[in-house]
Image: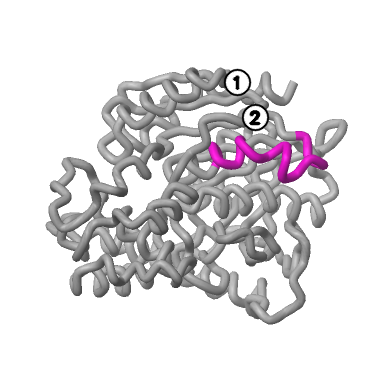
Amino acid sequence: MRSTVGRRAGIVVATVLAFSLFAGPAPSPSQPVGAPGDVVASSSVPQQMWPPGAATGSFLTYWTTGPLNRPALSTGATFLPPGGPPPGGWPVVSWAHGTVGLADVCAPTATGNFGGQYVEHWLREGYAVVATDYVGLGTPGVHPYLDGPTEAHSMIDMVRAARSVTPSLSNRWLALGQSQGGHAALVAASMATRYAPELDFRGTVATGAPSNLEQLAPLVGPNFPPLPLTGSTVFVAYALAGLRASRPDLDVDSYLSPLGVSALDRLEELCYQDAAPQLQGVTIGQLMSRNLDDPAILDAIRGTLGVPVRGYDRPLFIGQGLLDDIVPAAFSWKLTADLAANGQSFVYRTYPTGHLQTMPASLPDTTPFVRQAFS
């Protein structure tokens, strides 16, 4: 066991060093701002970081649209399957990852964790995979966790950026995301054809996607009851830390207890696997000094956490694990009811699985769905 852990630690250190050597220093925020999707740095991904099934890989740093619709930098990677592209170029899957943390060292381009066997499946199906880190993971500033519009912009602009440096990519693309990435994919789906009309957006697969979290915000305060869910305190703290960084005018710290301020400060430097033990036994209520009931902060929360319930003009697949103790199925029931009430067309499937297990469990349904979307 020790030797396995040691080898894994060595790989992580090597890949982080490789990224810093190959990609060079991150562009400074003071450099000239480019249009969304403009690439400011690119380099090869060391082969040891390629997901299984990839034939080539490249790192990118590119411009996108961040909080408050301001220009921001994001990083990501592009991976191609083996062989030559089909006529018209490789169809593109834009992969949005789940929660990894807030610190730059948590970014997939730093750790090499690009989705493992799940991403391998899509490469072997003949799709190029582009994978954003999101704004603030590997670029200046704190990652605005669960800021749906920012995540969505990062996801869409990653396609633009990848196509500008990889001529073999088609303009046909599909959004694919799990957990935090499912949230990103849903928001991206609601804006894709308007935000990037030059691309041929074909549809969305979102699994384990959090939704309706903004409905709970007015109740979040010192008396908020403990939730029987895995990681809920960390996820709320991440969202508050991201909001604190992107909206200093809201004075998020004034809603926090001393423990809450200290916790957010620590979590900005930690990846999820290290953050969870730090807050073990701490409730959401213990982070708070008063309720999040001010109209200004509630409006900001709705604008970031909220999942649109209209605007979906391409095929949409939503997958949910019935045993999910991170994003409970009840959240998706409310989302799908709202989508139906607004006349949206979608496919909804449930699986007798937990959170991460929903990804492989859904493949018998999502594989033909994606194939049809690209046909």
Q: Quadrant of residue 88?
A: top right
**Residue 254 counted in the magenta span:** no
Dot 1: what SS? helix
Q: Quadrant of residue 18?
A: bottom right
In the rendered image, which residue does mark 1 sit on?
369
Q: Position of residue 340 (x, y in %)?
A: 49, 18
- Residue occupying image coordinates x 77% and y 35%: 200
Q: Position of residue 129 (x, y in %)?
A: 65, 44
Task: Using the rendered image of the protein, determine whether residue 14 is visible from the camera's viewpoint.
Answer: yes
Q: Quadrant of residue 64?
A: bottom right
Q: Is residue 123 left or right of residue 255?
A: right
Instruction: Look at the image and give the residue range highlighted in magenta.
Output: 185-200
Q: Residue 203 has which mark?
A: 2
- Residue occupying image coordinates x 51% and y 48%: 148
Quarter of the image with the C terminus in it? top right
- Specify few, some or many for label 1: CA neighbours under 10 Å numbering under 14, 14-19, or 20 or more: some
- Residue occupying image coordinates x 42% and y 62%: 243
